[in-house]
Amino acid sequence: MSEKKYNAYWFDPGFTKHIHHLKHEDVKFLEVGSFEGFSTNFFLEFFLTHNNATITVVDPWIKYSESTVANISGLDNLINDNTYELFLQNTEMYEDKIIKHRGFSKDILPLLEQEYDFIFIDGDHSTEAVMQDAVDAFKLLKVNGIMVFDDYEWAWSNTSPKPAVDQFISDYADKIEVLEKNYQLTLKKLCD
């Protein structure tokens, strides 16, 4: 087994107090944007310990500037075509619990049929893409399921997830409960 190697530790587990009830249960997680597998491994090691628990991951694993709607540049040295191999290496001990979809979330999420107990959105941070991910992922979230938007307050190159998340919260106000709003935003689905 290879040693895990991460070039960046971009993951804050502060929201996990809202998903403790899912720990060690037969649950399904969805992660949009998996990067090098640090967060994927965290979920597998601390939450998805039940024999039947799985995580579905969606990521194009290509240069970030080529994978974002806003062509966000400046991160290609960390997020590029080599990232997929690093993800595979870092998560190999859990490969039987990971369902991998390599491609753009806008293409993959509408094809998924599984319902999820928890969804972590940390993919393309372009405003337009975050809105699309929010709408598509919400359809897959079980009632009473939890969804987290990572990097809610993040801004780079004149784009940010925040406007999209705020619009989503406004549009879906009667179907959700916002549990926490800080650098991440955590919500609960109340109804379809």
Image (tube, rainbow, N blue to C red):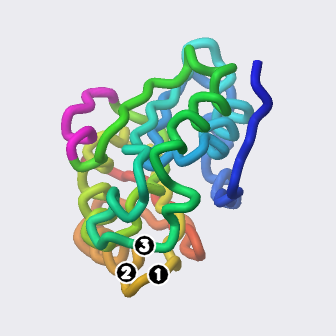
- Pointer 1: residues within 10 angstroms few (<14), some, or many (20+)? few
Relative image position of residue 127 (x, y in whole percent): 31, 73
- Residue 159 circle label: 2
Along the horizontal axis of the image, is 61 left or right of 127? Answer: right
Quadrant of the image occupied by residue 165: bottom left
Task: Please report the bounds of the magenta region as a residue range.
Answer: 107-114
Mark 3, residue position: 73
Tell me if residue 51 comes above or below residue 88 in the rendering.
Answer: above
The verdict on residue 61 being magenta is no
Give the residue displayed 56% in from the left and 68% down from the top: 184
Give the dominant element type of the magenta stretch: helix, strand or loop.
helix
Q: Are marks 2 and 1 in contact (CB under 8 Å)?
A: yes
| Amino acid under disc 1 | Trp
Q: State which tag comes first along the sequence, 3 or 1.
A: 3
The residue at the far bottom in this view is 158
Q: Secondary structure at mark 1?
A: loop
Q: Which residue is mark 1?
A: 156
Q: Amino acid at mark 3?
A: Ser
Q: Quadrant of residue 2?
A: top right
Looking at the figure, which quarter contains the N terminus? top right
**Relative depth, front residue between 4 and 130:** 4
Residue at image location 31% in from the left, 50% down from the top: 138
Q: CA distance from mark 3 to mark 1?
A: 9 Å
Labels 2, 3: front one: 3
